[in-house]
Amino acid sequence: MTKVNALNPTVQFLLGAAAFVIIVAGMKAASSILIPFLLATFFAIICAPPLMWLQEKKLPVGWALLIVIASIVILQMGLVTIVSSSLNDFSQSLPLYQIRLQQFEQTLVSSLKSIGIEVSQELFSNYFNPKLIMGFMGKTLGGVGNALSDAFLILLLVIFMLLEAAHIPTKLRVMLVQPDLSMQHFTKVVKNINHYLMLKTLISFATGFSVWLLLVLLQIDYAVLLGLVTFFLNYVPNIGSLIAAIPGVLLTLVQLGPMPALYAAVGYVLINTLWGNVVEPRVMGRGLGLSTLVVFVSLVFWGWVLGPVGMLLSLPLTMTVKIVLEANQDTRWLAILLDSEKGAKAALEAKNASA
């Protein structure tokens, strides 16, 4: 009697799809626990290189960990304080800003009618909803603030992750059947994820700082809050910088008028062009691109599963999946599907060259 060693491809696909649905449903149901865990992982990956650097300088592990943890506590407390206080002030000013935007909307419609361009007020309001636009920033940062408010839980998770990181390679060597080959694969994945998150965080910080400086020069309220919005949304490529620019330009419009709003828009374009299109591709390299469709789908997917924090972490999460898939020859074709057109062409050139 012949033994069947493999399932039918259709059955394999259905089982895989069913497992995916169950995993996603479980993630959505456990989002309140999963979000602090993901944020802690995010902080731990970013903090790992400074911890290793301090250890290389012959500093004891305990002191090195204490310095890193103290830095995390100060940063976290600062973020929570800034976001909370700024959101409270912004929430109080939001009705006034919405009224001013509605007045500008009515003035614009009247001006268009005066030159013979008929525009429906109701249709214009549907596409230019001041309440929706101005409320987006508060909702997004509110979700981040709520997540960061679990400071104690996140801090404990980061501490245990950093302590455990030094022992993971030894445990994997004991567990794995082919430790040398598997460890090489594991090291490559961790190194690429760490490299990406560190560089992306530095570029996001530079972009947010540049926006803050621009708005301070224009004397716009909530410059720090808008800089934080830019920092967080910069993790979402292509559309993240566009979304971050909308609240800043609108606030400039309602506070100073059309011409300063134009200056702010030009400033946003120059800042995002410099950091996003000039600096980032040079320091990131080729292998970290995603197609525009994948970026949009990942934004919607992770936002649906994890809420506003999922939207902000959508790119790091998707990039982690892509890097893991790319490191394994059996799943590399899935990573190519997620890659950008430029990345796919480079992979094709490399394949033809090796052939």
Image (cartoon, rainbow, N blue to C red):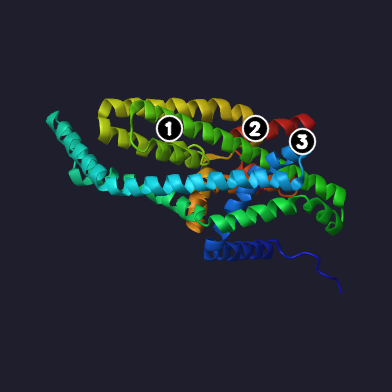
Left or right of 221, for residue 116: left
- Rendered position, 92 above or below 230: below
Q: Residues within 10 Å of mark 2 (few under 14, many from 20)?
A: some
At 61% from the left and 48% from the top, the residue drawn is: 42
Residue 343: image x %, image y %?
A: 63, 34
The type of residue carrying mark 2 is Arg
The type of residue carrying mark 1 is Trp
Q: Which residue is identified by label 1?
A: 212
- Rendered position, 172 above or below 46: below
- Rendered position, 169 above or below 289: below
Residue 192 visible in the snapshot? no
Alpha carbons under labels 3 and 2: distance apart: 32 Å
Q: Quadrant of the C terminus?
A: top right
Q: Quadrant of the N terminus?
A: bottom right
Left or right of 252, for residue 81: right
Q: Residues within 10 Å of mark 3 (few under 14, many from 20)?
A: few
Q: Which residue is identified by label 3?
A: 57
